[in-house]
Image (cartoon, grey):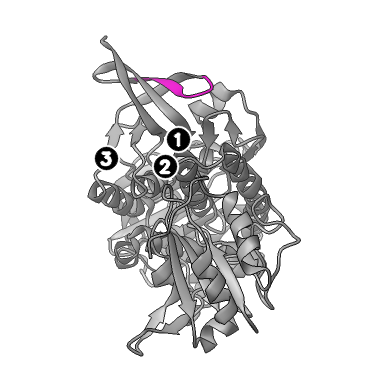
Amino acid sequence: MNDLENSRTIDVLIAGAGPTGTTLAIDLMRRGVTVRIIDKAPHSFEGSRAKGIQPRTLEVFDDLGTIDDILAGSSDYPRLGIHLGPVAAPWRMFRNRERTTDVPHPNTRLIPQYRTDSVLHDRLEQLGGRVEYGQELVEFVQDSTSVTATVIGDGGTERITARYLVGAEGGSSAVRSQLGLSFLGTTDEQDRMLIVDAVTTGVSRDRWHIWPGVKGRFAGACPLPHSDLFQWMIRLAPDEDPPEGAEAITRRIQAHTRNRNIELHDIRWRSVFRPNIRLAEAYRRGRVFLAGDAAHVHTPAGAQGLNTGIQDAYNLGWKLGQVLAGADARLLDSYEAERLPIAAGVLGLSTQKYEGIAKLDPSSLRRGKDEQQLSLTYYGGPLAPTDCDRTATLQVGDRAPDAELLGTDGAPEHLFDSFRGPHFTLVAHGPNAAAAGEELDWPATGAPLRRVVVDAGEDFCRSYGIKGDTLLLIRPDGYIGHIATRNFLASTQTAARAMTPVARQESVR
């Protein structure tokens, strides 16, 4: 086997090309960071697995330039059809919400994971990147300036040196294992679920069908949008051997549903799932980070795992970009400080939902604001101290909502249009805040600053709870980095200093 030494040091090596790793690669590449993304699988994932995209993640995809393809490949969630003997009781899992100016994507979208992966991989290629499949990271060493990883693939053994390494390769993460980090939690080997993607006849596509059973056993069939496939979920008995093949799985489904008309054909993907509920003890050791399922694994209830992983990447990407451009390396400490508590809370939510599904607890079947991840906040964390100014509705660390503004030509514009891109945004309302915003120095390196002055913005003032002169610094990931209602220039400059390189020069506009 050939042993290749790559003498060039790249900025970031990402292990794992699922939604988390690919989101991170996209965000880094648009910042000019040199990235390699590897995956030990021979090709992209072909199953539906995680299939719910929450409103906050849709906003991330909007910023990354993938929202149109995600919306085109997805659908709203169908109503549940709970089969109780010959009767199918309708149940709405989500209350469909109308778009508002502050929440442009109010509803969770249904899309199989293989399609989400495809959209993200296409975007990565548009930016000049590509996933290197069949490349397995087997070990690494790190020092004070870099990480050198040993990667094995068809071409032999390669050693890749990077300034940072991110493990995003799932619950069985080799990166986490080599770091020696505990993966705290439980795996219930007696609770198994067979998941199958297959063409199915004998069941309507206008419902997500649920057939309850005794002792918490159930079968479910979710129609996957823009395809002829269903995702089947069959909860197995503790001593039951999972059926294999279309005929055996069809017999198992027919026995449970008592519907002889249901038949499976053309199985595309099959997996046996065990509910893992685990959280890594830390997200970082030195120059090595964990993200997504490598850091936290969830039950599938509530569609939280994939979304939480994508937002890990969205939080880490701009911080790596800033530190590589010269910001204080302590900025990277805020990644774990902000994201680990979020994952802990999400684990509790998804576990509660999963435990209630078998009991057909209505609160477990219903999805609402908690799952949408719009109200998650970093308030009280290292970049969002509690002694900052606030508005009537928002505090530092909160998600910055969208708002409708009037452009210079009188036509409506959206604040998210100004946020879109790898920059910070400075939003000024009122003459004193606007004057201070003009004086704010900004570094020539790292993420640039875009300045927005809101002169007449009734919708903006309502969404942001603003009653007087206010200066807001919006982070590249769409969270509020600073609020100033007084002492505009000095307080904003101090907040920016913790997130930017030292050297300053007039910003781009």
Answer above or below: position of 482 versus 252. below
Q: Which of marks 1 and 2 is in front?
A: 2
- Picture quadrant where residue 91 is located: bottom right
Q: Residue at x 30, y 54 (%)?
A: 119
The amino acid on which the numbered mark 1 sits, given as a three-letter code, is Glu
Q: Which residue is drawn at 46% across and 18% down?
A: 139
Answer above or below: position of 424 versus 339. below
Contact (CB < 8 A) between labels 1 and 2? yes
Of callouts 1 and 3, the N-terminal one: 3
Residue hosting label 2: 21
Q: From which residue to which does the magenta span run?
A: 143-151
Disc number placed over residue 169 in the picture, else none: 1
Dot 1: element: loop
Residue hosting label 3: 130
- Residue 35 lies left or right of residue 393; in this view the side is left
- Alpha-carbon distance for marks 1 and 2? 8 Å
Q: Which residue is drawn at 48% across and 64% down?
A: 425
Dot 2: element: helix
On the image, the x and y values in percent for residue 214 come to 63, 55
The amino acid on which the numbered mark 3 sits, given as a three-letter code, is Arg
Nearest the viewer among 483 and 307 is 483
The amino acid on which the numbered mark 2 sits, given as a three-letter code, is Gly
Q: Is residue 493 magenta?
A: no
Of callouts 1 and 2, the N-terminal one: 2
Of callouts 2 and 3, the N-terminal one: 2
